[in-house]
Image (cartoon, rainbow, N blue to C red):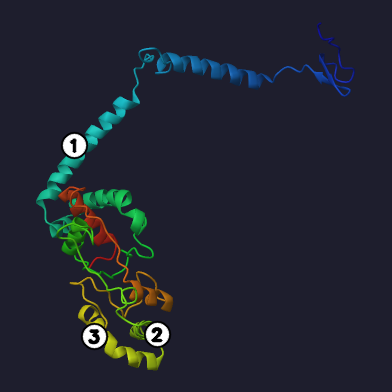
Amino acid sequence: MALERETDDVTGVETTGHEWDGIRELDNPLPRWWLWTWYACIAFAIGYWVLMPAWPGLHGYTKGMLHKSDRVEVATELKALDLQRGSGAAMMRKASLTQIEQDPKLQAYAQQVGQSVFGDNCATCHGIGGTGGKGYPNLRDDVWLWGGTLEDIQHTITVGIRSGHPGARLSQMPAFGRDELLAPAQISDLTEYVVKLSGRPADAAAVARAAPVFAVQCVACHNADGRGNQELGAPNLTDSDWLYGSDRAAISGQIFAGNGGVMPTWGGRLSPETIKALAVYVHANAGGQ
């Protein structure tokens, strides 16, 4: 049964015949701008189907009259990038670290490669800006457990820290509490001693009691003045940089458990010239010595 179409008395527009709760739907035409936009979209779609790869088939897809292929373009760009990197890598391979930093062209290349490699492999732990976090060293300051020269940084990247590599940087602070090497009272006194070393107010009596304990247990690595030893990877206890936290709870926890992080070895994952570029990038942009 056909709907009864009437003309609205107020607007003079024919209705669609639909009515809800006394409200009748007017059969207004679509705006011309909307129709032309719609027609243009249809025309564009048809043109796109003809010119560009579009329709899938049983054994492939329509190639389009322009024969455009993102796959081919990406392959071409990657080939060009390989050629560019190949020449740069060859120069990096022959140059020493010092020569790279002194040559503006080589340094610019190393900065670009190093930034990319750092973002892909190092930023997960050290952060995008290299500022690190709890348990992950800040590479933006001048504090280096294993040395901050170009050669030191290159070696650390190559072999890692506690990574299992035969030449890895290796140090281990004893777990004085967990392994019951010191009593809880001695750990508490040592905590005050370390707080005092860093130039902060501490319990004088506890510091006095801890002095002989520090001399026997800690001086071998941290030295008598507490300034550490880069050859052993022993941190300086007199500055304001703390890998695991500077409050008493964090210091006591470190003495108790002897935490030690792991940095992977990149020697087998990155090429020697890439490691050079990464070392130059870290040294130039992150407070190298």
Amino acid carrying mark 1 in the image: Leu
Q: Which mark is residue 228?
A: none
- Residue at x 21%, y 37% (from the top left corner): 82
Amino acid carrying mark 3 in the image: Val
Total numbered circles: 3
Name the secondary structure under disc 3.
helix
Which quadrant does the C terminus fall into?
bottom left
Q: Which residue is mark 3?
A: 216
Which quadrant does the N terminus fall into?
top right
Q: Vertical placement of 53 versus 259: above or below? A: above
Residue 142 placed where, x, y %? 28, 70
> Residue 127: in sight, yes or no?
yes
Q: Which residue is mark 1?
A: 83
Residue 115 placed where, x, y %? 29, 51
- Residue at x 34%, y 73% (from the top left corner): 178
> Residue 241: in sight, yes or no?
no
